[in-house]
Structures are given as structure tokens and as C-alpha cells.
Amino acid sequence: MKQSVVFVFLVAAAAHAQERPLLFRGARVIPIAGPEIEDGALLIQNGKIVAVGARQSIPAPGGAEVVDLRGKVIMPGLVDTHSHIGSVEGGDSSAPIQPDARALDSVNVRDSRLQKAQAGGITTVNIMPGSGHLLSGQTIYLKLRDGGTIEELALRNADGSIAGGMKMANGTNSRRAPPFPGTRAKSAALLREQLIKAVEYRDKIRKAAGDPEKMPARDLRMEALAEVLDLRRIVHFHTHRHDDILSVLRLQREFGFRVVLHHVSDAWMVAGEIAKAGAPCSLILIDSPGGKLEAKDNRFISGAALERAGVLTAFHTDDGVTDSRLFLRMAALAVRAGMSRQKALEALTIAGARMLDLDARIGSLEPGKDADFVILSGDPLSVYTKVLETWVEGVKVFDRTVATDRLYAVGGYGAGRSGEFYVDEEWLQ
């Protein structure tokens, strides 16, 4: 009973804290939506951004708490367009195409990797089922709030439904023993076959015009694919090799679905074709050797090549391929290879928000948007910079000065265990 009272008190205290204006001033502010502000200020209240600008242009409202951040940097919360935190599961070995499987039903929000993502400055994430299928299921978009259920973290569409996309893949991952395809050609054929069935299912529903006697038997697989065809669910397509990328674009032209290309190791080879198709890309830049053969030509120059071609480009962690705590370095690696600073920072924030249809709420520091932001010790592209605090909708969810939070940030015994947390008090001193 005592625990419940404490919990209620903490929730009430957090809600009350959001009502009081908070003014952060003196930091270098990187709004993404405009030029960087050397001596800036950010005002938030009720989980929203009220104002952002030069320090002297934003006076403290009555009753506001003022936080001095001189020497620090503020930027929008990071958006990870492709992650597997939460021990997410999708389809099983029974079939290569399983659009009825939902990440919603498998994410463990008490997985410690969610806290590690907060420690990396990530505030919004697209959690994807694995890529061992041509279609492994429905993804889910989460805000990394502190919560005990998936519903508390899930983002919602305008109609109240859970927001998410559809995970598809090609290349070597799905090529295995039957019922899975053994070749690239058969992979495309199987996916095309299911999309044609979905077109027919959707058309039957349209012709029925609400008449229950004319409606086809309910099919969860076809329902989900019909959402893809009706542009209500974006396809997040795992693809690496240049020919696999072009196969995705061929299918997209044929069926008209919205697509984001993920990983795109060979993007630098086919940047022009990607640009002509108008397909956004979410890149992963890995700075160590290894991985699959089809990713052998992955190059840091892909970000610069896509920028020159005019392609909307974001980054992702694919956690645990890249640790969520190291997400900022993705932009630094891209800049080192020729991508502009502005586009690299956008690739961590607003570009990913656009790919998830969330740019009206997140991805930049602008009045009216959610108060999702990160406080850094220095420039976001510096290897020496640390995430000091992460805020989601005006609530601090990570603070490096707090011993338990710092353990998530730096590792240590117990930091990776889900459902259990051990702190070595002697180590923390």
C-alpha cells in the first residue's frame, strides 16, 4: 500500500511540475528549424515548447523555474527510426509473410534498453520486428516516457489507433529453407503475390459499401496489407545491396505504397535512382568491420551522396547493432565523409520525424511542439560530448548526475538486466 501511495504521489508531482514554466537559458540552442543560437533560451510548460530564441528575447514568466545552462548545448530529442529495443518479436517460422503480427503485442517496456536509449538522448523510436522474414509484422512508434505498459508509451494516430508502420525485408535474411524463399527472384514474387491478394481484398470491401452480406470474411493479414495500400501504414523496408534496393523501388512503383528504405548499404551506388523514386532513406553507419556479406560495400559517404541527390535522409541504431547510447556519433561519421552538419543533425531529428509522420509534434525546437529535448555537455558531433539530460514532453527521463541513470549511460554490473536492477554503491562513489 505504501508503494502505491508513493507512486501516486510521484505521478502527481510530475504532473504538477509540468504546469510550472521552465526556462532554460544560456546554452547554445540547436533548434534544427533555424540557425543555431549561441546564447539561447528554451521555455516550456505543460509538456510543450512555448518559446525558443536568444536569451535576452525570452523573459522569465511569473513563477517560472530558471535553469542556467551556460556552457551546455540543447537540441531536439533524437528520433531513432529503426530499433529492436524492448525484446520485440514479430513473425515466426511458419511463413515468410506475416503482416498480422504486431510489435504492440511483444514489446517489453521494462527492458533496460529503453533506459539506455534515454541515456543516448533518444526520445522517439520506431520499434521493428526482426528482418528474417519478407514481412515480419507491424512496427510501433513509442515515446520513451517512463511507463509500465506499452499503451503509456505508444504514440497514437488522429483516430486514436496505435501508430506504426510495416516491416518488410529482402536480401539474404529471408532466403532460407521452405516455406521461405531460396532466391531473390522468389522473394519478390512471394511479396508481389500477397500484395495482389490484398488489392483484391480491399476492392471487395469497397464494393460491399458497408453491406455485411457482401463483405469478405475477415482476414487480419489482408487488413494490415490494405492499410499499406491505402497509405495509412508506411512500409519500413530492410534492404542493403544495390539490386535489392532497386527491387524495392520496383514494387513501390507497382503498388503505390509509401516506403522508407532502411540500412541501404549501397545507397551511394544508386542515389540517383532513389531520388527519382522520392524514397526516403534511413541509414546505419557502422564503424567496425563484420556483419553480413551484402553489407560489405557500406560506406560513410552514403549520407553525402544522398544529400547531393536531394533524398530525405535519417539515421538509425538498429539497436543492438549499434548501441542507442552512441547514436550521436552516426552524424559525426557522416559529416566526416562529406555530409553537411545541418543535414546530419536533421538526420538525427526532423528527418526521422518526417519518416514517421510525426514532424508536426517532434524533431525540432519550435513553439507548440512537444517538449522533447536533450541537454549535452558539448557539441553533438564531438566524441567527448556526453548526454547530460533527456526530457520527454517536459518531464526529465534521464539525468546523468543521478547514480542509477548514470549506470545506464556508462554500463556496469546490472545495467543490462531487464526486470532487475543492481547498483554497486561502492562503485558509484
Image (tube, helix red, strand yellow):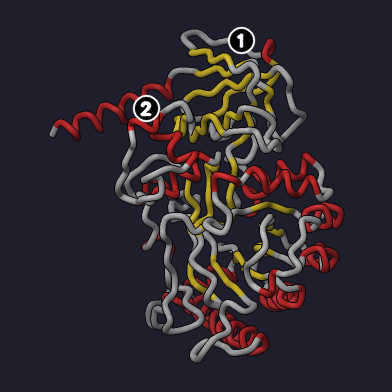
Q: Nearer the viewer, residue 292 or 283?
A: 292
Residue 280 spot, x, y in % from top left: 71, 59
Residue that appears at 43% across and 81% down:
93
Residue that appears at 63% across and 23% down:
72
The amino acid sitting under disc 1 is Pro
Residue that appears at 56% across and 10% down:
60
Residue 82 spot, x, y in % from top left: 57, 57
Q: Nearer the viewer, residue 60 or 115?
A: 115
SS assignment at label 2: helix
Question: Is residue 44 found left or right of 242 in the rendered image?
Answer: left
In the rendered image, the residue lying farthest to the left is: 1
Query: Which residue lies under the disc numbered 2?
Result: 15
Q: CA distance from mark 1 to mark 2?
A: 24 Å
In the rendered image, the residue lying farthest to the top is: 62
Identify the mark nearer the N-term, 1 or 2: 2
The amino acid sitting under disc 2 is Ala
The quadrant in which residue 404 appears is top left
Q: Nearer the viewer, residue 339 or 151?
A: 339
Say the numbered circle drawn on residue 301: none
User: Which quadrant is the N terminus positioned in?
Assistant: top left
Graded by Cα atoms within 10 Å as few (under 14), some (14 to 19) or many (20 or more), the crowding at tag 1 reads: few
Query: Which residue lies under the disc numbered 1?
Result: 59
Residue 94 spot, x, y in % from top left: 42, 84
